Amino acid sequence: MLVSTKKMLEKAEKEHYAVAQININNLEWTKAVLEVSQELNSPVILGVSEGAGKYMGGYKTVVGMVKGMLEELNITVPVSIHLDHGGYDACIKCIEAGFPSIMYDGSHDSIEENLKKTKEIVEMAHAKGITVEAEVGAIGGEEDGKLAAGECADPEECREIAETGIDLLAAGIGNIHGKYPENWAGLSFETLEAVRKATGHLPLVLHGGTGIPEDMVKKSIDMGVCKINVNTECQLAFTAEVRKYIEEGKDLVGKGFDPRKLLKPGTEAIKQTVRDKMEMFGSIGKAE
C-alpha cells in the first residue's frame, strides 16, 4: 500500500532500523523490489531520479505503474514513491503527479537560496500531505551525469534547513554516489553526530549506500540514519547477469531472445541485492 514516507521513517527511527530506498529504472526493477518487500515483510521506498522518471515516460506514468502493481501483485507492505535529487520544477511536477514523497536538492546553490526554495517546496508539499527531504553538503560521485566530490555538511546549515519544516535530511558525511574509490576515507561519524545534535530527532538519510562497509552502515543506523539509498549496486548486479546470459549464448537457444527471458537473470540479481540490503538495514519483518 502507498503510504507516507514520514510515518514510515518515524517508526524506523524509533525502532533503530533503516528503510531501503531502492531506485527504480523500469517495470522489471519495480516489480522485483515490490515482490521482495512483500516476501520479507519489509517497508520500502521506490526512488525515482529525474532521469529515470523521464526514461519511464514521466512521473504520472511512474505513479500509475506502481499503483497498478500494488493492486495486481497484492502488495500489502508499506510502499512509498520518492523523487530523488529533484530540482525545483521536478518537485512541483511530482507533487502534481501524486508522489507521496519528494526530495528537493538545493545543495549546489548558496545556503540562502537553498533555504528559500526548500521552504517554498515544503509549503506546497505539506499542503497535500507530501513528505519532503532536503540536502545540505553535496553528496559526491555521479548524479544524473554530474560529477561531484563528497563533502561534510555544516551542522549549523543543517539546523537552518531543518527549521524550514522538512521531514527528512540528507547531510553529506563523506558519502558518494556510485562506486567508492580505493582511497575513500570512510564516513565521518563526527559530522553525523554533530548533525544529529543540531537537528534533534529529524530522520536522517544516507545517500550512496552502494559499497559502504556493513559496520559503517550499522553504526550510522545506530546514530539516527533511518533511510539508506541504493541504486548502483542493483544496476551492477543486473548488468552482470544479463551480460553472462548473452555471453553464454542463451539468447540464441530457442526463444531465448524473448526480452522476458533475457532480462530475468538480471531481475533475479536485483532481488537478491535487495534482500541483502534489507537484511543489513534491519527492516525485515518491520512492515506494519
Image (spheres, rainbow, N blue to C red):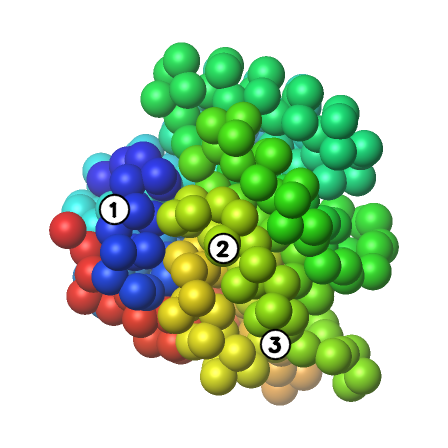
Q: Amino acid at mark 2?
A: Arg
Query: Residue 66 bears which disc, if any?
Result: none
* Cβ atoms at labels 1 and 3 below 8 Å apart: no
In this view, the residue in front, 226 or 66, is: 226
Q: Secondary structure at mark 1?
A: loop
Q: Is residue 181 visible?
A: yes
Query: Residue 14 at what x, y percent from top left?
Result: 26, 56
Query: Residue 211 bears which disc, if any?
Result: 3
First of labels 1, 3 by sequence position: 1
Query: Residue 185 at what x, y percent from top left?
Result: 74, 79
- The residue sitting at 46% across, 76% down in the picture is 219
For the residues labelled 3 and 2, the Cα–Cα distance comes to 23 Å
* Eye-nearest disc, 1 or 2: 2
Query: Residue 78 bears which disc, if any?
Result: 1
Q: Amino acid at mark 1?
A: Pro
Query: Residue 251 at what x, y percent from top left?
Result: 59, 73
Q: Secondary structure at mark 2?
A: helix
Q: Secondary structure at mark 3?
A: loop
Q: Residues within 10 Å of mark 1 (few under 14, many from 20)?
A: many
Above or below for 88 versus 189: above
